[in-house]
Amino acid sequence: MGIELAEIFHRHGSLYREKYDTCMPAKHRQVMRAIEQCRTAALGGQVYICPGCEEKQYQYHSCRNRHCPKCQHQRTQQWLEKQQEMRLPIPHFLLTFTLPAGLRTVARSHQQLIYHLLFRTSAAATQQLSRDPRFVGGQIGMIGVLHTWGRNLAYHPHVHYLVPAGGLAKDGQTWLTARKNFLVPVKALSKLVRAKFREALRKHTCFADVPASVWKQDWVVHCQPVGNGEGALKYLAPYIFRVAISNNRILELADGKVTFRYKDTDTRKTRCCTLSAEEFIRRFLQHVLPKGFVKVRYFGFFSPGKRQQLASLHQQLSNLLPLSGSDHQDQQTDDQVVEPSPKDPIQCPTCGQTMQLLQTLRPNRCAPP
């Protein structure tokens, strides 16, 4: 077995917690503890035995923390299936809003506020432009997903939206089709979201900590057609429950340094990054979300309160010819992790027979010899 995130926390977590004792958020401590205990005797579990060769297998419980690299795969699949049912049978766009670098220091210290405003203002700006008759001319639907990390664990907050290519007219029934390969003008959208974000943040004391240059520069907004949206959903789904790095990307832990691999965004080539254990832990923890923060949000006719309207719209558009493909490639990442379903029978590794439950282990029990 290779190096896991839990092992890095076990070896270097205590020194990290001691060094940053006075300024480390309680949430970060909770996440570290959960990952350290995941699938160990500390959380309890079950003992299985093979009726044929009497081979024993210990199965420990998962922590189920949303920042743990060993957990959440099953929930990702369930979310994807639900979104596929909601997806309209028409072309889609993938719209991305990136938080400017000058705002990221403030964002790290006020994550709940900044992430919420990024969602709220970007959705409002897009909906405002979409209602303009020069573009869509009606109400659009948006599925938004927050993503905070770059491939090398750098802090890079941005929001992706999957948006059907069209909207509903004021009567709430007439469907208005967007132009081919065009949703709204991104330059105008960039200026509008910047103005809305500034106005919203002005009401909070941390506004004074934002460099003035942030409000003068262009904010990065990107919009691309993604065919029927199926590939884009598969791309977004892992970000819902995946964490900043998976265990299979960690290559080495030696001499107080961690080496991991990542895929360069521009060249698509695999590269290696080596950080001190302290810096690695710091980078990982900056992507821990505030307690209870919802990183997937729905707007327009995708809003939870409009699911009946969405069902009618889906039926209305279902007579269109189904799209055969997607312009957005399924971007396979290094973080794909496949976990067995807990309902799957456990097979004996020695003789292949189905193993039987022998004993239930309570939490905090000592590990087996």
Image: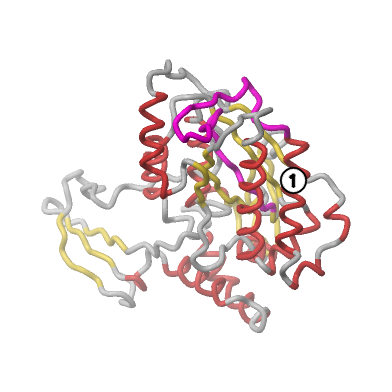
The answer, for residue 151, to whether it is visible in the render is no
Q: Quadrant of residue 55?
A: bottom left
Q: Residue 112 vs residue 45: left or right?
A: right
Outermost residue, bottom side: 22
Secondary structure found at label 1: helix
Residue corresponding to mark 1 = 192
Residue 200 versus residue 159 in the image, above or below:
below
107 and 20: which is toward the camera? 107
45 and 237: which is toward the camera? 237
Rendering coords of residue 366 (x, y %): 33, 76
Mark 1: give few (<14), some (14-19) or many (20+) Cα within 10 Å. Answer: many
Q: Quadrant of residue 287?
A: bottom right
Identified by mark 1, the residue type is Leu
Residue 46 versus residue 175 in the image, above or below:
below
Residue at x 46% of width, y 42% of height: 302
Outermost residue, left side: 51
* Residue 215 is inside the magenta segment: no
Residue at x 70% of width, y 50% of height: 273
The answer, for residue 186, to whether it is visible in the render is yes
Residue at x 63% of width, y 48% of height: 124
Q: Quadrant of residue 92?
A: top right
* Residue 161 is inside the magenta segment: yes
Residue at x 64% of width, y 63% of height: 286
Which contiguous range is marked in magenta?
156-185
96 and 269: which is toward the camera? 96
11 and 38: which is toward the camera? 38
Q: Residue 19 vs residue 195: left or right?
A: left
Rendering coords of residue 10 (x, y %): 53, 70
Rendering coords of residue 315 (x, y %): 36, 28
Rendering coords of residue 142 (x, y %): 54, 41
